[in-house]
Amino acid sequence: MQLKYGKDTISLMPDTGVAWNVLPEQIPGDFSVSGPRLVKEAVADLVNQLDAFPIPSRPRLLLIVPDHTRRCRLEEILAGLLPALEKKYDADIRILVANGSHVLQPEALLREVVGEAVCARHAVLQHDALDDVQLADLGTTTFGTPVRLNRLVIESDFVITIGAILYHYFAGFGGGPKMLLPGVAGLESIRINHRRTLDPVSGLFHHDCQEGNIVTNPVFIDLAQVVHFVPHALSLQVVLSPQGEIVEAAAGPILPIHRRLTERVRQIYALPIDDRADVVIASAGGYPADVNLIQSHKSIHHACQALKPAGTLIVLAECAQGIGSSYFMRYFTGATSCEMGLQLLRDYQINGHTALALRRKTETARIILVSGLDADAVRQTGMHAAASFAEAWAMTAPHLPAGARGYILPDSSKFVPIQR
């Protein structure tokens, strides 16, 4: 079989001595309704809802869209939304790319994500969390997180967020309010919110910060409050099939639409399993899911949930753009996850919780990473480096018990194994 690796594939010949299952075995859900029809209906609904707001003549409309790591078939959505807005309003439409704490995108990549035609017709801007000039103070959440957002949010007459919803390994689900925080928030707002992934006493990963939980999750509850600071906002949110087609689209207030569509995500992407396996082979799903180590960790996190304690995980993730964070590797000093957690309580920086989560996994499982990263850097994280799948399997086979069971996850960035 072929597993995605960056923009290419890797051929996989599973060892016949292992009882393998490929996850998912089948994908539930009716995907018969076409994406263009769903987008058209959602756009019409959105424009109708705008009538309830006091929008002036020639309004300033701000569309907040995801960056290249959060694909949502943006060109298809904009192709339906922009003409509808232009027909309804003689509007000044600006498009803001929600980079969050990610680095700014090269111009060529920006045009690829948004579309050449849109870039030629409208102002397309990138949010920079480090640029204080871009930011405005809106207040503070009840948790004490300062709400500093891109000032275009308050300078616009109306805001429309656009994005896809998927499981998120510590915020519960992506999309929805995350288009505002961290999407267009200042770095300090992001840092303080993301620090809530830590248990305030032990420093270990907070039990309630996990996929699918937005009810008791301190990170999500905090960031969701940001919506109340932007009352002049609506959203158009979608769910994609595993093949990347729009299978659900809805428009309206950010939080209710997000909560409604998360149920569709559960239906498609939760993978009930009866038992964990001795060995798991997981592809992050190729580019952009494996663009760097930070992004690839989500796939590692999901795959580990199908693995027995002390089992072996082989991850295929090219990481063509390296680690993805200037802070990340600083945490791997040889400390245990408990020591790292206490250090993070004293001095938390962006992506520190991801380093902690990875360190914890390497203490309980043997993780072999097939990537383009420097082998010494991989070993520093506690993982084992391999230059090919063949090398990774040679490192794995001698450690497997007789009658070993294994899972193969061709797209572990999206699917979440959940033990029944």
Image (cartoon, rainbow, N blue to C red):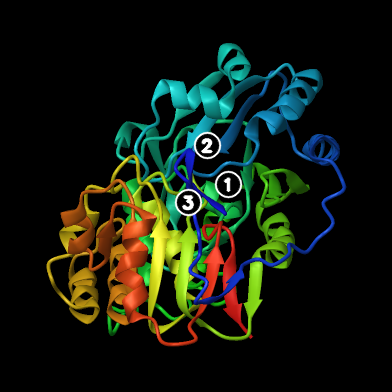
What residue does disc 1 label? 230
Q: Which one is in front, 19 or 148?
A: 19
Report the residue marked by disc 2.
153
Q: Which amino acid type is shown beneath numbered disc 2?
A: Val
Q: Which amino acid, by three-letter code, is at mark 3? A: Leu
At which x and y percent is residue 80? 76, 28
Crowding around mark 3 (Cα neighbors within 10 Å: few <14, some 14 to 19, many 20+) is many
Residue 334 picture quarter: bottom left
Classify the position of the C terminus by image quarter: bottom right
**Mark closer to the chain start, 2 or 3:** 2
Image x and y of residue 13, in percent: 50, 59
Pointers 2 and 1 in contact (C-beta within 8 Å)? yes
- Which residue was labeled with disc 3? 181
What residue lies at 72% left-to-right and 43% top-to-bottom? 245
Residue 109 position (above or below residue 236): above
Distance of mark 2 from mark 1, alpha carbons?
A: 8 Å
Residue 145 shows in this picture = no
* Residue at the (70%, 51%) spot, across then down: 241
Give the structural element (helix, strand or loop) at label 3. loop
Mark 3 or mark 1, whichever is nearer to me: 3
Depth order, front residue of 131/361: 361
Separation of marks 2 and 3 at Cα, in angstroms: 12 Å
* Percent of width and height locating residue 379: 20, 62
- In this picture, is 193 found above or below 317? below
